[in-house]
Structure formats: structure tokens, C-alpha cells
Amino acid sequence: MTEFLDFGFSTSEEIALVLAQRLKSLRVQKDIPQADLAQRMGVSRSTLNTLENTGKGSVISWIKLVQCLGQEGQLQPLFKPVTASIADMVKQQQPTRRRVTRNRTRPVVKR
């Protein structure tokens, strides 16, 4: 059973472990063997085992795990831009400025 943990008073390691336990619990509920899920994720079974039991893994591995368990919708609200004013809202709706690399001529070096 996964425990409730107040993330505001927890270390990053504690949070990672609780989230990993929750995802492992979901995998078990869905009756998905660890080897099958690892294969779907494109990682080794030992990588998934480490992630589930320690909470340690790359961000990409975490995202793959969440996606393979059908929980990607839970990621959507995580880091939404915060709108504090109308000016912020207008700024967020403006297209982002894109820069193009220009060709620079290199000076000729005489030897």
C-alpha cells in the first residue's frame, strides 16, 4: 500500500519513492508483469525494478512508465504556466520569438 506523504515537507528522494510505489501499485492492479512493462517502455527489467523500488531513474524512464500505465493525463497539470495578470496572459499567447542562425563568413587565416 502506498502511503500519503506531504510533498511540502519531504525530500526529493522520499517523493520519488512514494511516486514509484504508486506506479508499481498501479502496474500490479492492472496485472502487468514487470518484464512486459519494461519491454513496452523500451528499458531492461532491472531498470524498471530499480525505478519501482528506489524511485531512481531518468526523467525519460519516468515518463515512459507513466505513459505505458496510461497516466500521461496526470502530467498535464504539473507545470502549467501561472497567469498572474492580463499582461501575463497576453504574453503567453504571443508566438515565441524564433532566431535563425545566419551564415557568418570566417576570416581567412594566412599561414
Image: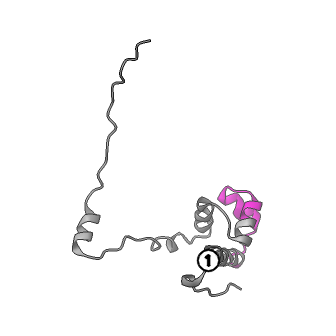
Specify the farthest residue to the front: 111
Residue name at image x 75 percent, y 68 percent: 33
Q: Position of residue 43 (x, y in %)?
A: 70, 56
| Left or right for 5, reference 1 | left
Examine the structure image and report whether residue 34 is included in the region drawn in magenta. yes
Q: Nearer the viewer, residue 36 or 58?
A: 58
Q: Which residue is mark 1?
A: 11
Q: Residue 12 in the image: x percent, y percent?
A: 61, 74
Q: Is residue 13 above or below residue 94?
A: below
Q: Which residues are magenta?
A: 29-49
Magenta stretch holds residue 5: no
Front residue (pair 45, 56):
56
Residue at x 76%, y 63% (from the top left corner):
35
Callout 1: SS: loop
| Main SS category, magenta section | helix
Q: Position of residue 85 (x, y in %)?
A: 25, 76
Q: Quadrant of residue 52?
A: bottom right
- Position of the C terminus by quadrant: top left
User: Residue 34 occupies which quadrant of the picture?
Assistant: bottom right
Amino acid type, residue under disc 1 in the picture: Thr
